[in-house]
Image (cartoon, grey):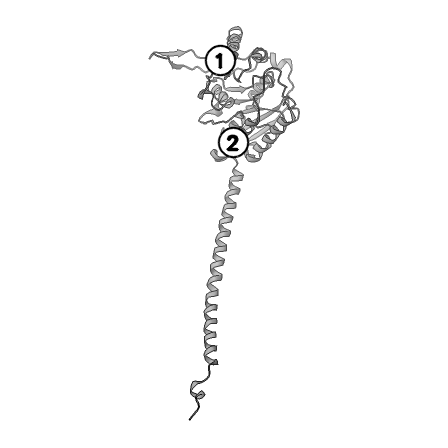
């Protein structure tokens, strides 16, 4: 595995200059219509980039985000996949944006998950849902709250294509980045603490990655082949870094912005879920935290050897004490017999 770090200053050429297009791949997808046996053929589609946006009650951020993505990704064939778990009118706002902005190069689609079992797992499973529906070679993930700068996605895509990397990860904690958008000292401490906990538990995967718990990244979709993702809570990037067979990761610094609309979903419960997520990964992925698993195995072997040594030593000592005790008993008996008076000489003559 290789990790690279890089700084990239965004300029107008990054946004306006078209990049290399992917080779068109024709696909024919058969879908069964509900309530019928006739198969529906979907026309082949080709995208340069798929962007997955998980949303929950973000109605005020949808239009600014969609417009920023449209500007930043101009010149690319892009599909924006909103996976929505909202209880307000966010789905209607997304549909309005789709009708107004969708074109042959910029397509918006909505995947609304009904309340209940469909939303189990939270934001992370929403991202998995969106990635399963993505069609482009590269898939990006960005939050809907505008704390992730949409213009950076073009930087991610260009760097991934130029350097042929598997993952591009936005980092708040490397030189050139900032996490000042985190609200409150408590949330910052929790974020930093969870980051170091993850890096400590999984050093083989994360030791050289400065921000393994972020939600702003781009990956090659082929990494998801034959991988079963089982995330908990919000830390989908951690799931991908541990379970997927990536070889090269590029980190790009960014400034985490303050939220302007809506309410943050981060709380103490999400921190607990992140710890449970790490525990699940440590237990389910054989190579995850391998150094600690080997260390525990060696420690267990040492304890077993020490216990066997103590048992053997105790048995050896006990076995050598028995002859000594028997000899001492015989000597005592002999000494007692010798000390008794001679009865024959002790009886006087009459």
Q: Residue at x 61, y 23 (%)?
A: 252
Q: Quadrant of residue 9?
A: top right
Q: Residue at x 46, y 77 (%)?
A: 334
Q: Which residue is mark 1?
A: 110
Count of labels in the image: 2
Name the element at disc 2. Answer: helix
Q: Residue at x 54, y 19 (%)?
A: 140
Residue 238 visible? The answer is yes
* Front one among 210 and 343: 343
* Front one among 171 and 54: 54
Residues tagged 1 and 2 counted as in contact (Cβ below 8 A): no
Name the element at disc 1. Answer: strand
Q: Earlier in the sequence, mark 1 or mark 2?
A: 1
Furthest toward the front, the residue is 350
Q: Quadrant of residue 30?
A: top left
Report the side of 310 relative to 17 (left or right). Answer: left
Q: For the residue carrying disc 1, how many other residues have a C-alpha within 10 Å: few (<14), some (14-19), or many (20+)? A: some
Furthest toward the left, the residue is 37
Quote the CA–CA distance across marks 1 and 2. Answer: 30 Å
Q: Picture coordinates of residue 52 (x, y %)?
A: 52, 18
Q: Picture coordinates of residue 175 (x, y %)?
A: 66, 26
Q: Which residue is mark 2?
A: 276
Q: Picture coordinates of residue 308 (x, y %)?
A: 48, 53
Q: Picture coordinates of residue 24 (x, y %)?
A: 47, 15
Residue 165 visible? The answer is no
Q: For the residue carrying disc 2, how many other residues have a C-alpha within 10 Å: few (<14), some (14-19), or many (20+)? A: some
* Front one among 296 and 72: 296
Is 105 above or below relative to 197? Answer: above
């Amino acid at each position: 595995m290789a990790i690279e770090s890089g700084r990239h200053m965004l300029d107008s050429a990054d946004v306006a200059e078209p990049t290399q297009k992917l080779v068109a791949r024709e696909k024919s997808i058969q879908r069964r219509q509900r309530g019928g046996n006739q198969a529906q053929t979907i026309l082949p589609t080709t995208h340069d980039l798929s962007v997955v946006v998980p949303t929950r009650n973000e109605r005020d951020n949808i239009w600014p985000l969609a417009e920023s993505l449209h500007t930043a990704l101009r010149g690319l064939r892009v599909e924006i996949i909103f996976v929505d778990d909202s209880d307000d009118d966010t789905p209607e706002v997304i549909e309005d944006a789709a009708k107004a902005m969708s074109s042959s190069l910029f397509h918006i689609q909505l995947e609304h998950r009904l309340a209940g079992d469909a939303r189990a797992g939270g934001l992370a499973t929403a991202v998995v849902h969106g990635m399963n529906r993505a069609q482009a070679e590269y898939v990006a993930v960005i939050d809907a709250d505008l704390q992730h700068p949409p213009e950076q996605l073009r930087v991610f895509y260009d760097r991934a294509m130029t350097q042929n990397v598997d993952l591009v990860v936005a980092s708040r904690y490397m030189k050139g980045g900032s996490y000042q958008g985190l609200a409150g000292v408590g949330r910052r401490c929790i974020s930093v603490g969870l980051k170091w906990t993850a890096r400590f538990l999984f050093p083989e995967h994360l030791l050289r990655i400065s921000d393994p718990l972020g939600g702003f990244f781009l990956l090659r979709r082929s990494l998801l082949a034959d991988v079963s993702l089982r995330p908990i809570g919000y830390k989908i990037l951690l799931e991908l870094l541990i379970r997927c067979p990536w070889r090269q990761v590029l980190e790009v610094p960014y400034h985490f912005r303050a939220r302007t609309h809506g309410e943050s979903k981060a709380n103490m419960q999400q921190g607990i879920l992140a710890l449970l997520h790490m525990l699940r990964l440590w237990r389910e992925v054989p190579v995850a935290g391998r150094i600690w698993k080997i260390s525990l195995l060696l420690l267990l072997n040492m304890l077993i050897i020490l216990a066997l040594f103590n048992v053997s030593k105790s048995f050896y000592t006990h076995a050598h004490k028995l002859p000594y005790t028997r000899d001492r008993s015989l000597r005592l008996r002999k000494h007692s017999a010798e000390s008794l008076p001679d009865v024959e000489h002790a009886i006087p003559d009459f």
